[in-house]
Amino acid sequence: MKTSAFSLVMFGGTGDLAMRKLLPALYQSFLDGAFEPASRVICAARTVYDDAGYRAWMDEAVKPNVTDRFDEVRWQEFLQHVLYVPFNATDDDAFEQLKAILDAQEPNNQRVFYLAVAPSIFELICEGLAKHALNQNARIVVEKPLGHDLASCIEINDVFAKHFKESQIFRIDHYLGKESVQNLMALRFGNSFFEPILRRDYIANVQITISEELGVERRAEFYDQTGALRDMVQNHLLQLLCFVAMNAPARMDADSIRDEKLAVLRSLKPWTLEDIQNNVVRGQYTAGISQGKPAQAYIAETDVPTNSLTETYVALKTEINNWRFAGVPFYLRTGKRMPKRMAEIVIVFKSVPYELIGKMPAGSNRLVIELQPEESIRMYCLAKRPGNNMKLGAVHLDMDADDFFPERRMDGYERLLLDALRGDLSLFVRRDEQEQAWHWVEPIIDVWQEQNIVPKPYTSGTWGPPAANALVARDGHNWHEEL
């Protein structure tokens, strides 16, 4: 599906995000015919290149990250759509040069600015764009999370609001671009049999997990200032929770969808000091075995202070104070150096009201929606074992998307870049939605600091601290991998 002709300016064009994610995603979109002949990708960074020099850099640095459908002839065709401009956000002449390049493009090209840069220069770029009237009828895409707390989030959003309308601002959360996340809406709102049972009368608990095998890798300096709560819970996990728990929107348009997500965030049970102490587990990985190899402790990682108290793991229990889900525990967890890379949503249903046939093991009826590394939906239930006795055994109904749909699955960034180019805000986060997420998370940060809560150690290659198991066990539940 083609987009209208566009001029996409990528600030941070030599950075890690552009190299590993954005430029490979744009190449895939090019292969799918999304580029009009007049479309251009204009990369901007401090390094001095001309167009040919930057394309040579892409050959060396970006091409190895194109892991799907690489074709040298098409790659060279794609490169002809890529331009480069040396850029220093503190230099007014750089904006003049950028304006001249954009004005030389087709006058009707949709202008989109992507800020793949540090938040510290957001304001400089926004002010420079506005000074040269480049903010008019343009769109701006910015990476989440924004800020490190509610106040800094508001401050950054105020910068954007000063120069752009809310309808021009695309706050990107790459998780929302995954086919499997979008399939949550299809699953819930495209099938009649799920709606009646997704409520407190039938659900025992809901578990949402995002786990990673890797440690901090090359992100240690950033990660140590951020931690798992800010990096994963405040955005990815809460967004998944919203898609699981939201009511059906009035229409499938951006504001209707985001209104329903905001309603979920506003309904989350407010934190008390006791809740945080009892229902939030903060962890940090120690040395162990990961992916079959020795793994060092977090505090032994390069660029991590040896006395760091940054959490690499968070598990928490919360509730949604509305009629649909009141009293249902929602367990969220994320961590690094865990046994496998995985993102899944598990909806555990209550046992039958009277066990007529025999004891029903915990979690016998559950819906498991796997988001990564594979996309699948699995429904667990009990059936009679063969023989002359009425004995039950666990079985499952399995839907693997690959078995049904031959189409290629887009990478999250690929989908979201196309949506930004087309002006579809449905999978982007609105300001009030984002600030409400920070409002809910911030009390945890405050209590950790005020109470000096030290992360609990967990061995690399395990599912987290023992306290995370106790978190669900005291409610009579188990994590999915234990069922």
Image: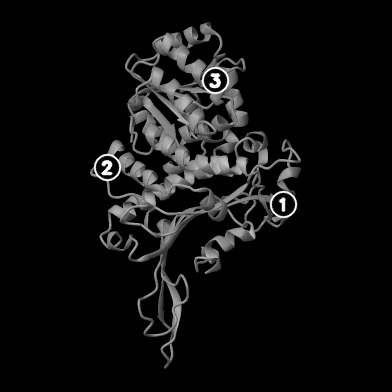
What x and y, as percent, mark residue 297?
Answer: 73, 48
Q: Which residue is mark 2?
A: 252
Total numbered labels: 3
Q: Secondary structure at mark 3?
A: helix
Circle 2 SS class = loop
Q: Residue at x 39, y 32 (%)?
A: 431
Label 1 neighbour load within 10 Å: few <14, some 14-19, many 20+: some
Work out whether mark 1 precedes mark 3 in sequence or the reverse, and give the earlier one: 3
Residue on which disc 1 sits = 286
Residue at x 64%, y 51% (from the top left corner): 283
Residue 49: x and y, percent? 60, 16
Calculate the distance from the C-alpha at mark 1 to the C-alpha at mark 2. 45 Å
Judge whether residue 68 can be spotted in this image. Answer: no
The amino acid on which the numbered mark 1 sits, given as a three-letter code, is Thr
Residue sitting at 35 percent across and 76 percent down?
A: 353
The residues tagged by marks 1 and 3 sit, at their Cα atoms, a distance apart of 35 Å
Kindly identify the amino acid type of the residue bearing the numbered disc 3: Ile
Question: The disc labelled 2 sits on which kind of residue?
Answer: Met
Most foreground residue, 166 or 387 = 166
Residue 380 location in percent, x, y?
A: 42, 69
The earlier-in-sequence mark between 2 and 3 is 3
Pointer 1 or 2: first along the chain: 2
Q: Is residue 232 above or below residue 122?
A: below
Tag 1 near tag 3, CB within 8 Å: no
Q: Residues within 10 Å of mark 2 (few under 14, many from 20)?
A: few
Which of the two residues, 54 or 356, is positioned nearer the viewer here?
356
* Quarter of image, res 464: bottom right
Query: Can you tell which mark lies on residue 121?
Result: 3
- Give whichever of 390, 409 is nearer the camera: 390
